[in-house]
Image (spheres, helix red, strand yellow):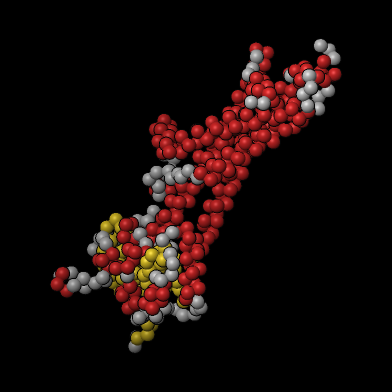
Amino acid sequence: MSYELFVSLRQLKAKRTQRFISLNTWISIGGVALGVMALIVVIAVMSGFGKDLRDKILGTNSHVVVTNVTQTGMVDYETIMEKVVKVEGVKAAAPFILNQVMLAYGDNAVGVVVRGVDADREAGVSDLEKNLVQGSLKMLERPDKSSGKPRRDGIILGKELARRLGVQLEDAVSMVAPASRMTPMGLIPKIKLFLVVGFFESGMFEYDSNLAFISIHSAQKFFAMKGKVSGIEIRVVDIEQADQVAAGIQDSLGFPYFARDWMRMNKNLFSALRLEKIVMFIILILIILVAAFNIVSTLFMVVMEKTKEIAILKSMGASRSSIMKIFSFQGLIIGVTGTMIGCIGGFTVVPNLNEIVGLIENIFGITAFPSDVYYLDKLPSEIQYFDSFLIVVFSIIICFVASLYPAWRASRLDPVEGLRYE
């Protein structure tokens, strides 16, 4: 151990006449620890929210979508799917039809987006089957005549959509197409009855209240798209590499086909989350900056208190760089100690965050995150080790930089002035 570090550690131990300086030192350590812990917890929660949102979006949607930009539908979709599944990183593919319609039941009518899916292939490209609270995808196909039930095609509704329409299982809803058809009596809207065979709940209010599923064969008949689909849904092996897989699919298919990954389709949403995360990082780093100003004031008081000791060290041959090291080490020790305490606190709080929130709710009799508003059964959190590493580095650097000016002032002290009245 160098003598500069030894002297720094000795000076951090308070004597009877230096209790106030010692208190300031502990306040500085506490400020750094609080800032680091707050940053780790907030970044973990925001990362958890982002992952939860991503899982909910991908629970209903596929990772990559391929469409034809020059036509209203894709005719040779089976051939395109054969090419797509050969691209590296593709796990599964399925056709789909997407259109807007109006659903009516009794006196209620709602404009929704209806998606025609292949019941046999849809489970391979999305988590729709897992999100079903009643029914199954197999029930979308028209039942056999031998079943004794009306020969109507099935429809699966979002839970919120079903509540808005007031429908129950086995009810028949009317689907009205946006395009009318010409008859001898004039233009008549195209209407068809569908049997409600299931409900799904994705956890996203926009999807649960505005989305319905029918079989792809029913969609082809209803929208007059015989032998055509709107596009192809694709599931990839690694969702973080979806953009690269989409680029590979685009290169394989070429024009006029257009491949978009889930990150591009939801770019605004995830860009907003990323920006919010950065802003929160900047705001919370101010807590550490406040602690850094505390370090500056503490070291200035130490310099004023230790004027005689500094003069003695310099008269014994200590160089300016050695004096500067002594006081900069003190700021570094405060920063490292506070950062380590903050890390321990952050890594302890994040895994037990829901228990802590539950305890606060019980004590104050409040509901911090109402499930009907946030669609959460628990507070999502995920420790980001790289982000935590950056927080540690920033914290230590800020504390070290804060100690440089007081250390420089101490190194410039004239030993004659320090010992003049001794």
**What count of labels does the image hold?**
0
Q: Position of residue 59 (x, y in %)?
A: 38, 58
Q: As rendered, which of 83 and 301 lies closer to the eye?
A: 83
Q: What residue appears at the point 74 percent right and 23 percent down from the top-left corner? A: 303
Regarding residue 109, the answer to whether it shows in the image is no
Q: Position of residue 168 (x, y in %)?
A: 26, 59
Q: Position of residue 371 (x, y in %)?
A: 39, 46
State the residue lying farthest toward the bottom. Answer: 184
Regarding residue 156, the answer to whether it shows in the image is yes
Please identify the quarter of the rendering in which residue 58 is found. bottom left
Q: As rendered, which of 81 and 42 lies closer to the eye?
A: 81
* Image: 173 above or below 229: above
Q: What residue appears at the point 15 percent right and 70 percent down from the top-left corner? A: 148
Q: As rendered, which of 301 and 314 lies closer to the eye?
A: 314
Q: What residue appears at the point 50 percent right and 45 percent down from the top-left corner? A: 384
* Image: 240 above or below 148: above
Quarter in which the N terminus is drawn: top right
**Left or right of 10 on screen, residue 346:** left
Q: What residue appears at the point 61 percent right and 26 percent down from the top-left corner? A: 27
* Image: 126 above or below 394: below
Quarter in which the C terminus is drawn: top right
Q: Position of residue 221 (x, y in %)?
A: 32, 78
